Image: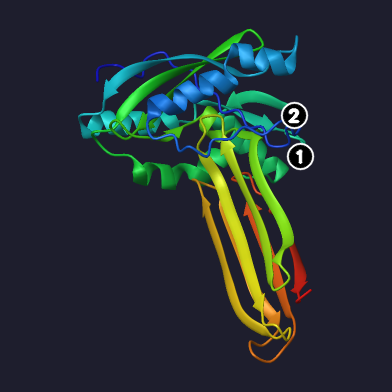
Amino acid sequence: MKSILCGVSWVVFLMWNMPMAAQVSTSGRLGTWKEQLEYALKHHGEEAVKSRDGNGVGLYLKGYTYRGKIDLERELEEVKSRLFSDVANTVCYYDNTRYAYDVVSVGLMRCLSGVMGQTVMIDAIRNDCEKEMHTGMEVIELEWCKEGNTYRSWAVAEKEGRIVFENIGCLIADMESMEQCDRDSAESEREKVFEKSCTLRNLLGMELYSYRMYCRSSFGEDGILKSVQMHAKQSSAFGWHCSAEIYTEEGVIDQDAYHLCHWKNKVTPPWGGAMGESGTFTHKKE
């Protein structure tokens, strides 16, 4: 891999509070970096973005080029250095809407973020990203466009596998991809089910976070609670933190005629500002 990092301008573009739109299902897991980038071209290429944005064309992926394999440790260090360099470009946001921003260097962003009391996202994910990078990985150059400007980034991927990190599309929360489930229903008069879940992906179809809380309460003919199946699962990408919890507050098996549960979840993006919900529900025989 010779001189693959020459002449690259880096831009990290974050969009969190994007308007909700039709959901895009990516439940079929994208297994390779090529599948991920083809997904991005399909859903976030020029034509797709134009159809959504109209005349105001937002950020879109124009194309990508395979640049080779990282064979040596010094090449790996070169990749890491350019990814997180102070001279790399990023976006500094000036309010919580994630719309008012300027493109600045990472170094300047650190200064401005300190003044504004904001977290520098690229620093929040750097340690985790670097730990996952190693020789033998593949490098792909991506070309992004926005409002007439062109930005290039490098994706670092497992050999013939998925992308580990890329500092434009990887860092944009694609709100159109959000998949949610929120139900508390009866499957029969004696089987009650509660489920709450959410999955959010980035522009490359990679999960930023996912959680699922589930409870099934079963009752006997006499209305007494007979069994409970309950679990909570969560996962998150570099820099993101996700938690989910569900537990019984009241209701004893073979004793009570109800099951009272409490649930809660919390998601913290790399730039800070935790978001979460909590609540209770009660299951009884109908």
Give residue 171's position: percent from left, percent from top.
55, 34
**Alpha-carbon neighbours of circle 1 within 10 Å: few (<14), some, or many (≥20)?**
few
Of the pair 226 and 137, the residue shown nearer to us: 226
Residue at x 65% of width, y 49% of height: 272
Left or right, 139 with reference to 214: left
Quadrant of residue 225 in the image?
bottom right
Residue at x 59% of width, y 32% of height: 172
Does dot 2 land on a helix, a strand or a loop? loop
Does dot 1 land on a helix, a strand or a loop? loop
* Res 84 visible: no
Q: Is residue 104 above or below residue 6?
A: below
Q: Which residue is mark 1?
A: 96
Q: Which residue is mark 2?
A: 99
Of the pair 276 and 84, the residue shown nearer to us: 276
Question: Which labelled disc corresponds to residue 148?
Answer: none
Residue at x 45% of width, y 38% of height: 29
Quadrant of residue 220 in the image?
bottom right
Left or right, 77 with reference to 51: left
- Number of callouts in the render? 2
Q: Is residue 88 above or below residue 214?
A: above
Residue flagged by tag 2: what amino acid is it?
Tyr
Q: Is residue 281 above or below residue 179?
A: below
Question: Cα distance, mark 1 to mark 2?
Answer: 8 Å
**Alpha-carbon neighbours of circle 2 within 10 Å: few (<14), some, or many (≥20)?**
some
Give residue 94's position: percent from left, percent from top.
74, 34
Residue at x 74% of width, y 61% of height: 184
Give residue 144's position: percent from left, percent from top.
54, 16
Q: Residue furthest front?
A: 221
- In the picture, the quarter occupied by the C terminus is bottom right
Residue flagged by tag 1: what amino acid is it?
Asn
Of the pair 140 and 258, the residue shown nearer to us: 258
